[in-house]
Amino acid sequence: MGNSKRQLLEVVSPRLQYTGVSLDTPHGFSIESGTTYVVIGENGSGKTTLGRIIERGWNIGMNQIRGDKRRLSIKSIEFNDIHSLTGCADSYYQQRFESMMSDGIPTVGELIAGKIAPERWEELCSRLSITDILHKRVNFLSSGELRKFLIINMFTEIPDILIVDNPYIGLDAASRSLFNELLHDIACQGTAVILLLCNTVDIPPFTDFVLPMKQLTVGKMLAVADMGLAGVIDEVTKVFSTKGGIDLLPDVTLHEPIDYRNAFELRHCEVRYGSTVILHDVNWRVEAGDRWALLGENGSGKSTLLSLVYADNPQGYSNDITIFDCRRGCGESIWDIKRRIGYISPEMHLYFGNGEDTLTVVASGLHDNVGCFRRLSPEQLALARQWLDALGIGHTAGRMMRTLSSGEQRMALLARTFIKNAPLLILDEPLHGLDMMQKRLVAGVIARMLQDEGRTIIYVTHYEAEIPPEISRIKRLVKI
């Protein structure tokens, strides 16, 4: 863009405020057209708040932002709540697996109608490998497919400023690469792109400037042209610190005897919704103590397969499934199954937005229920606090879950998963949305738990480098 770039806004006040949160901005900064910015820092450092201020906080209190807000088109996308596209996020998870709950849920075609030329839609869908989603109801899309759909929706217009919060989580490698191409293209057309990230590995190569953040303070803007991308990464790595620690972990030794040979076995399993087949002829036996990674591109059915094992999918009763050596449909309670499984999924945060405090949410994992309907003992609450301290978020114990950053919510839900000390761990993208130091800490917790030879693990990720070294076997699903 060279000399054609123009200043769109300038932050001049030493402090910014939004919905009760204050950010220190001792250096100020400006945003120019056709330029790519990365705002990076730990979870809870204030990145999302800064994005919201740039989008809609110009006239709040002390905020001094120069620019013509009335003439600027600013678009902001937050990827931590993609399921709000269904219009009923609080029950999204059940709706994915129960077709009778789909009345009133829009199709992809209905949501995208009139926003994009058919030729452009077909081109982007083909490049993102989601050519078959137009007629699907939104609740039947996988998390990855929803993200791809949101990406396409993002590029239906060319705003002056595009703010994207944590866009890479849940995307397979090919989709991450294409997403970067699209971001670069829109920047070349004059849009100022602002990415809010929590991992240096996600900083795209075409980044122009990086704004580090730590403890609600915006650092000095770093120019990639002056320092080189490697130099910038070395500098911003300093804003990340380790909190909690393995030495604070409670006892994670299995005290329950392993009285089964197979954790589960699926025989010729199929899941379909109408004419749409999600899984076909899937066979998989996982013996007690096995360590598996479950891989596959977005939409290949990974989460659906796990819903069969975790007894969340009604079609489990029409398939030949054995869990803990007991065949499904032979009189066992789903709670008998869930009692032995520690489970986390990308959607789980949707269950906890109704006023539960973090400590209670973590302790509720001991009872397998979603929600806090049973009285918790002082011992259970003390154990929950120990897990929060070990994962470095003890300061969130008394806060409502909905007030936490997406990364802090994720750490709390991991604590809720681990507190049960279950013999079977099903971890569906467990590092989803965590900053780089939190990822290292959680990886250490998983390694400690896998020191117990009787424990079984199923680990889902789109980043193969994140697969724990203790995992030796891979199950790969192919999209039908």
Image (cartoon, rainbow, N blue to C red):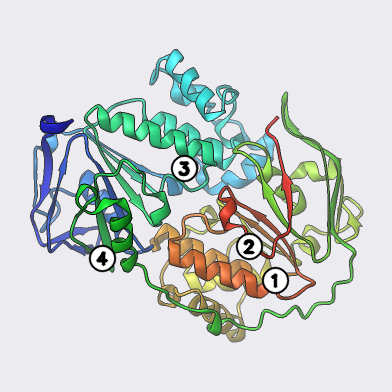
Q: Residue at x 44, y 73 (%)?
A: 393
Q: Secondary structure at mark 2?
A: loop
Q: Amino acid at mark 3?
A: Ile
363, above or below 158, in the image: below
Q: Amino acid at mark 2?
A: Pro
Where residue 473 appears, as percent x and y from the top left, is 75, 55
The alpha-carbon separation of the residues under discs 2 and 1 comes to 10 Å
Name the residue beneath numbered marker 2.
Answer: 468
Q: Secondary structure at mark 1?
A: loop
Q: Looking at the image, is mark 4 or mark 2 nearer the viewer?
A: 2
Q: Secondary structure at mark 3?
A: helix
Locate the N terminus by quadrant.
top left
Residue 82 marker: 3
Tag 2–tag 1 contact (CB < 8 Å): yes
Tag 4–tag 1 contact (CB < 8 Å): no
Taking the image as shown, residue 277 lies to the left or right of residue 392, namely right
**Within 10 angstroms of label 4, few (less than 14), some, or many (20 or more) residues?**
some
The alpha-carbon separation of the residues under discs 3 and 1 comes to 32 Å
Q: Residue at x 56, y 51 (%)?
A: 346
Tag 4–tag 2 contact (CB < 8 Å): no
Where residue 237 appears, as percent x and y from the top left, is 34, 64
Q: Secondary structure at mark 4?
A: loop
Q: Is residue 471 visible?
A: yes
Name the residue beneath numbered marker 1.
Answer: 450
The earlier-in-sequence mark between 2 and 3 is 3
The earlier-in-sequence mark between 4 and 2 is 4
Q: Amino acid at mark 4?
A: Leu
Residue 216 marker: 4
Taking the image as shown, residue 252 lies to the left or right of residue 18, namely right
Q: Looking at the image, is mark 2 or mark 3 nearer the viewer?
A: 2
